[in-house]
Amino acid sequence: MTQRNNRPVPFVTATAKGGAILAGAAIVLLVVVMLAEAMLRYVFSYPLGWNVSAVERLLMPAAVFFSLPWLYVHGGHVTADLVYERLAPSVRRFARVLTVVLIVVAAALLVIAGGREAWESFRLGDVPPPGSSDVAVPTWVWQGIQPLGALALLAVVLVDAGRFIRDEEVTP
Amino acid sequence: MIVLIVSIVLLALILLRVPVAFSIMAASILGLGLLGGLSNVVGVFAVIPTSAVGSFSLSAIPLFILMAHLVLESGALGAVFDSARTLVGRVRGGTGIAAVVAGAGFASVSGSSTAAAATLAHTSTRTMVEEGYSQRLATGTVASAGTLAAMIPPSILLVFYAVTAETSIGETFMAGLLPGLLMATALGLTVYVMALRGHAPGAHRSPLAQKLRAVLGLAPVLLLFALVVGTVFFGVTTPTEAAAMGCLGGLILMIWRRRLTLDRLRAAILGSVVSSGMILAIIFAAYVFGHFLAESRMTPAIVDAVSALEVPSALIMALIVLLYLLLGFFMDQMAIIALTVPVTLPVVEALGYDPVWFGVLIILAAEIGLITPPLGLNSFVTARASGIRLETVFLGAVPFIAAMLIVVVLVFVFPEIALWIPGLMQ
Amino acid sequence: DATVLKLADNYAPTHMFAEYGVLGFIEEIQEAADEPISVEYYPSGQMGGPREVLSLNRAGSLDITPAAPAYLADQLPLSSVTDLPGLFENSCVAARSLQELLSPGGILYEEEYEPRGLRPLWVAVLPGYEIMTVGRPVEQPADLRGLTIRSSGGAMDGNIAALGAAPVSMPASDAYEALSRRTVDGVSFPPASVLPYRLQEVLAYSTEGLNAGAFAIPYVMSESTWESLTQVQQQRVQEAAQRANERLCEGIEHEGPAAREVMAEDGVEFVRFDEQQAEEFAEMLQPVRERWASELDRVGKPGSAVLQEFERALQTHERDADQEEGTA
Ligand code: NA
Ligand code: NA
């Protein structure tokens, strides 16, 4: 059996890593914000107030959507299963093509639909007014997380598609 | 009809190994498109994914995952298995029982099953086989002990169930404790019975001093468990705050055990990115699917139909639990909860059953699928980590599956097992 | 073939917003046999939270949804003028005034709803917000310092901050869970909507007569849906909406006192202020309106103009209501 290069190209690994760093930072910030809030609330009786919307609008979406390319590269073989392994090679190949097509379609939808939403908010100038308890960033910023993360996934999958379909498993 | 077609497509995609989140999204695109055209699909994809994960309560999930990774990197869990082994002493099947205890120990700081099975497989399978355990018993023990993590608090599945079912997160979180301990007992007894039937030798005897030292080996994990679960039980913190404190505790454990290095910290954080990303991606995909289900207006029709049935409600409940058992064979547990609870819970509540109890029950049932073919993830992980054939692991799991089924029946018949502790909190 | 309209909101079909508003509206527009309309109704947040249903409406997945400025402070900051404290006591006066500003030509329609492709149909206004707590009673302004109080968002955040507490904005449907888990120490809520959320079960105390603001919820149709309707259908929708507006405010006026009774029966203690305390609270709340207007002016939005317009409309409708009462 000929040894062929089954490593993703540097663009793929670098994009995945960049996303993972952002997602990891979001998870660490979750801990920090939560502890700071608990501290200020119980010890000093002075809650932050904006922590809820910071978690909901910025940190949670960042933790998920920026992790998508990294998941594609590193989470690929968690669903190993008996059924798949007993399929004919041609069917398995079909399944991999189908996987790529479906990820591309779903990611493109996440980009286009989410991007349109963020663009609308940008166009209309949506931003929490002064004195609001919401975290003070323009709406398009947090609405932009989903399309941006999905765009990174889309780029990674398109660049990597040939290798993914050729090879049995994604092993970086 | 559309719902049926879409469900079949979903199952087919999962079996073809399309990643679960994307299988769900693809099925949803089909369903939403059939019901409302492209503008409907785009509308839902514009709004729902971000808002689904943008939930303060769900932030407990990445936090509990990070906590488990930090504890894992601290190496405190290896000590738990050794300590348990020393403490159980010369009971027949003692090392296997120790693996169950270690599984429970890991469960008390970890929220999901598969990580637990992987860790346990590394530490304990080899030890058991070297001591003369049959490969079947050694791997069956480890694969099934891994499932404890999804029941003994903290449980990510129970937190997510509470968010979906809109039950109290704190109470649902605590409801898993007794059923989890009952499950641990059942698994331990199974090891003992199998040992008596010749699958395992007697364990070694340890002097008292060594046993006392062993208790100290359990202390850090028990302390962390007490911190996280205790503060939730007494209502001092919410599960989310407790999870953040747990992360701090995990970090302190790393420092205390002199294991804090940049590499390990990075490994813990990146490991959390994978686990939480995967779970939350399934969750947002499932919310998109939920929109399709709502638009199909199937749920109210089912609730009406079931309520009109002239059969005892206990029978309907038994069938629902059976459904979860079957789904567990084919689907990811998180996806099962996310996709089905919006449909089944209204039925269960219409029949007058407690939603917290229902959550515990269906998670117990669905978790059995983690060790059975064809998708038994814990069995795969155990086989891979121990180098033992998958078929052997599945065979070894059979007596444990029987034990788990008995626990499901017990919790079904005696709801107090799940509801007693949450009742104390009110 | 009937034109199908999808209506989604976040309230149970038993909530007064449905009982006096949505249900009657649906019934009326479905009645006519010529150029028929049929409505698919998704209550109770089946289609998502307040933000989500509005976005789904604008994106074309839904046709009629609420668009409550309080939950959409980044999108509809001016429209939360109704949520300011001490402006009115009567729901009908407030609803008619707001409706005027929301109609084509009205300042809120032109500034906020029209640019977003939204056409307000009817509104519900809950007046008379009180501060309700789980732990300790609020007897004087100092008692509020350091408490986290659930806010409906928007201008309400400012009202709560002015009283010295920290506002946490969340939908009303999350309030029960937040109170029982002590994520918040209390809520800013109108008595009329305590019962639908069973908050009386977890609450221990409520102020009485604080008037710390209000909550307004316009139900809107997207402009694209509106334009897809025939003229006959448009007229039918408009007339049904007008009647929903009137039914709702009368229903709300009726529910308030009744709710207070049920709450008291369920063990919620109402705290009345003496004159000095009442004055102190009023003094704290008074500058909120001016500050709200000037802060919006500062970021380039016509806050003062909106406040003036609304106060003018309130005066007109209050006079009309008084006259009606006089002749009756
Ligand atoms: Na656990
Ligand atoms: Na619309």
Image (tube, rainbow, N blue to C red):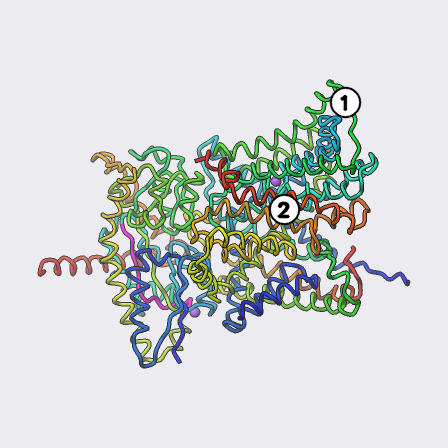
Q: Quadrant of ligand 2?
A: bottom left
Mark 1 closeness class: few <14, some 14–19, many ≥20 residues within 10 Å:
some
Name the residue beneath numbered marker 2: A25
- Where residue C68 appears, as percent x and y from the top left, is 37, 58
Q: What is the chain identity of the residue bearing mark 1?
A: B
Q: Nearer the viewer, residue B23 or A67?
A: B23
Give the number of the disc on residue A161: none
Is C157 situated left or right of B231 in this image? left
Asked if marks 2 and 1 touch (Cβ < 8 Å), the reply is: no
Is C149 situated left or right of B256 in this image? left
- Where residue B149 appears, as percent x and y from the top left, is 63, 41
Above or below, C287 against A163 in this view is above
Q: Which residues are magenta?
A: C115-127
Name the quadrant containing residue B154: top right
Q: How many angstroms separate mark 2 from mark 1 (CA)?
A: 46 Å
Q: Residue furthest left?
A: C327
Mark 2 closeness class: few <14, some 14–19, many ≥20 residues within 10 Å:
some
- Where residue C79 appears, as percent x and y from the top left, is 35, 58
Q: Residue furthest right?
A: A1
Q: Is residue A54 visible?
A: no
Q: Is residue C123 magenta?
A: yes
**Labels 2 and 1 share a subunit:** no
Give the number of the disc on residue B206: 1
Q: Nearer the viewer, residue B223 or B102?
A: B102
Under tag 2, what secondary structure?
helix
Q: Amino acid at mark 2?
A: Ala
Q: Amino acid at mark 1?
A: Ser
| Label 2 near ligand 1 (CB < 8 Å) | no
